[in-house]
Amino acid sequence: MAEIQLRNVSKRFGDIVAVDDLSIDVKDGEFVVLLGPSGAGKTTTLRLIAGLEKPDGGDVLIDGEIATHVHPSDRDVAFIFQQYSLYPHLTVFGNLAFPLRSPRRRSSESEIRARVQAVAEMLHMESKLDNMATHLSGGEMQRVAIGRALVRQPKVFLMDEPLSSLDAKLREELRIELKRLHRTIGATIIYVTHDQVEATTLADRIGILEHGRLVQLGTPREVYGNPVSLGAAQRLGSPPINLLPPALFDPAGMPAGTATVAIRPEDIVLHDAQSQPTGDALNLRVLEYSPLRHLLILDREGTAVVATTVAERNFTPGQSVGVSMPPRSLLYFRADGRRIPT
């Protein structure tokens, strides 16, 4: 396996800045997920690492060696796309064996069979080796696409939203498979997604990309609990973080320059309504309650506030509920989205 480093890498497409002075270190054997909205530069970053795009500035390093001008076929990197890209006229065995039969590899038939069998067993596809690719389910096709990368034993796996075309049940199954595979082979994996569930389930570290820039890199717990920007705070969390106007809060306890106050739904404390609320307590009106998800939507002066509750109690629309937002749980952001330290 290998470590990957990007040093001040930039890439433009005409007037569009796809990647903007991006620097990141991915450790040997690490699973890093790049998370961000469409147009954040996630796929372009993978293509720059693979050599499918040339940077306009900066360098890509693989195992400490500058690879910026190394041909893609010489980088020993496997790229797994959203589309399965299987050969429909070949069996599962034929698809898995195909990379090993290239003239560059010169593998013997016995070596090919042994390697394909090992990968098929790893992916629980050994009973499907004689099936045509066109006879596979979506989940099986993606397993074969992953297997075709595995047989090569590359230094690095680059995965561009490989599960996004699958239904929810298959995505969950393959997330578990990918995590198991990573533990088994110890591969260096850089994975792109806009799905926060995939990111938090799979990643050792998550890189938040915004407008081609890396705004935060940390463990899922670090990014969730200590976001450095409003975008990072919004990227993780279901239900999403509450964004509230400063006018709803006492200005005496608020940092200068605050444009948005944020609080996670699980950090809101619920209690019985009080005739005269004290401290940070408020009485809010219930707009909606979802008992199966333990979600409570409240009204605060025309602003919807979402809270989670595990209490075994019922709420009804129009009911008054006591709410506290502990100051230690409040996050403050400037107009440009930067976090204000407190």
Image (cartoon, rainbow, N blue to C red):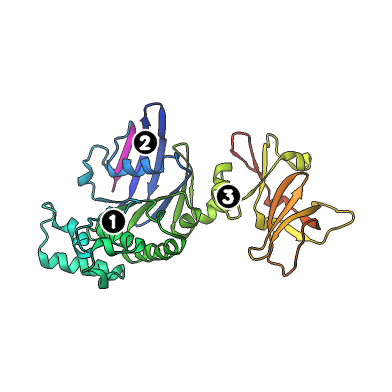
- Label 1 element class: loop
Secondary structure beneath dot 2 equals: strand
**Where residue 68 sits: x, y (%)?**
27, 38
Q: Please give the name of the residue rendered at 85% of the width and 53% of the height, measured from the top-left corner.
A: 278
Using a 10 Å C-alpha cutoff, classify the residue at mark 1 as few (fewer than 14 neighbours), some (14 to 19) or many (20 or more): many
Disc 3 secondary structure class: loop
The CA distance from mark 1 to mark 2 is: 22 Å
Q: Nearer the viewer, residue 252 or 49?
A: 49
User: At which x and y percent is residue 308?
Assistant: 67, 59
What residue would you read off at disc 2? 9
Residue located beneath label 1 in the image: 1
- Image vertical order of residue 203 relative to residue 126, above or below: above
Magenta region: 57-65
**Disc number placed over residue 226 in the picture, else none:** 3
Q: State the CA–CA distance, disc 1 to disc 3.
A: 31 Å
Q: Which mark is residue 233?
A: none
Residue 72: x %, y % from top left: 23, 43
Q: Examine the rendering and report whether any part of residue 302 can be seen.
A: yes
Question: Which residue lies at the image location 63% right of the left edge and 36% below the top edge?
Answer: 334
